[in-house]
Image (spheres, grey):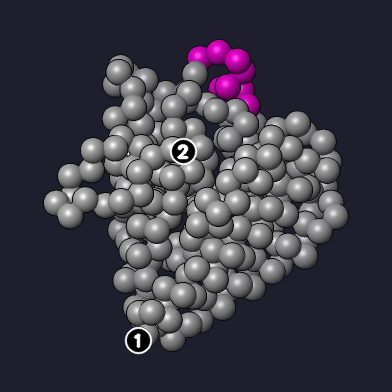
Amino acid sequence: MTDPLAPLTELPGVRAAADKARDALAEVHRHKTNRRGWPTTAAEAAVRAARSSSALDGGDTELPADGAVADPILAGALRVGQALEGDALRNLVGIWERAPLQALARLHLLAAADLVDDEGELGRPRAHGGVAERLDVLVQTLLATSAPAPVAAAVVHGELMTLKPFGTADALVARAASRLVTVSSGLDPHALGVPEVFLLRRRQAYLDAAAGFGAGTPAGVGGWVVFCCGALEDGAREAMSIAEAAAG
């Protein structure tokens, strides 16, 4: 069977960018702090990712001292962040590997719980616009590909950003699903990277690159994949700063 993502790895700059992302994340996992203390650094990474992801979608970033989060976007981002660390992450990765659509539904339920009026909308993709068919194609693509993990993560991220399968909190779900790919593939097994910080710093470039992916041209798709690989590489640097701070 032909690998559906193989042509992407041959686009200009993609293979080199994927290799740099992989090497940067591998170095983070070799850091002395992360050999045993990775649960602590992963927890900090999850919080930073949640705050940045909230800001990307127009939500708050400040965590109330009493823990009562009023902003629905931040609350959803924090719930997703909690699902992407520790035992919860292992459980979610297991669901992702067996039934990716169930994992996406779970992510949407967490992300959008305070954003919809009808709870029946949570975790349910839109019933029109060919959403179900495209999600099925995405799942089949993941099952069939042996493309480098950074490339697969970028495709999942971009397809969900473009498709907007739920109609609410889709970008947050897309970023979380991309993280699931990096974890399940072994690229970032403990979810130490924080690419969301990079995406927030370059928010307009992020949105422009996502639009390029949605256009479907080789330049647009290749540019998106390279951009996402750069976010993973920069997220590894963020993770390294967390590890260094934890080391004292």
| Residue sitting farthest toward the top | 128
At 42% across and 73% down in the image, what residue appears?
242
Q: Kindly identify the amino acid type of the residue bearing the numbered disc 2.
A: Asp
Element assignment for label 2: loop
Q: Quadrant of residue 142?
A: top right
Q: What x and y, as percent, mark residue 148?
A: 69, 58
Q: CA distance from mark 1 to mark 2?
A: 33 Å
Q: Nearer the viewer, residue 200 or 40?
A: 200
The image shows residue 228, relative to residue 120, as above or below, that is below
Q: Nearer the viewer, residue 179 or 87?
A: 179
The residue under label 2 is: 57
Q: Is residue 131 magenta?
A: yes
**Magenta residue span:** 127-134
At label 2, counting other C-alpha atoms closer than 10 Å, the crowd grade (few under 14, some 14-19, many 20 or more) is: some
Q: Earlier in the sequence, mark 1 or mark 2?
A: 2
The image shows residue 42, relative to residue 66, as above or below, that is below
Check the picture and name the quadrant holding the N terminus: top right
Q: What x and y, as percent, mark residue 149?
A: 63, 57
Left or right: 85, with 10 as reference point? left
At 35% across and 57% down in the image, what residue appears?
47
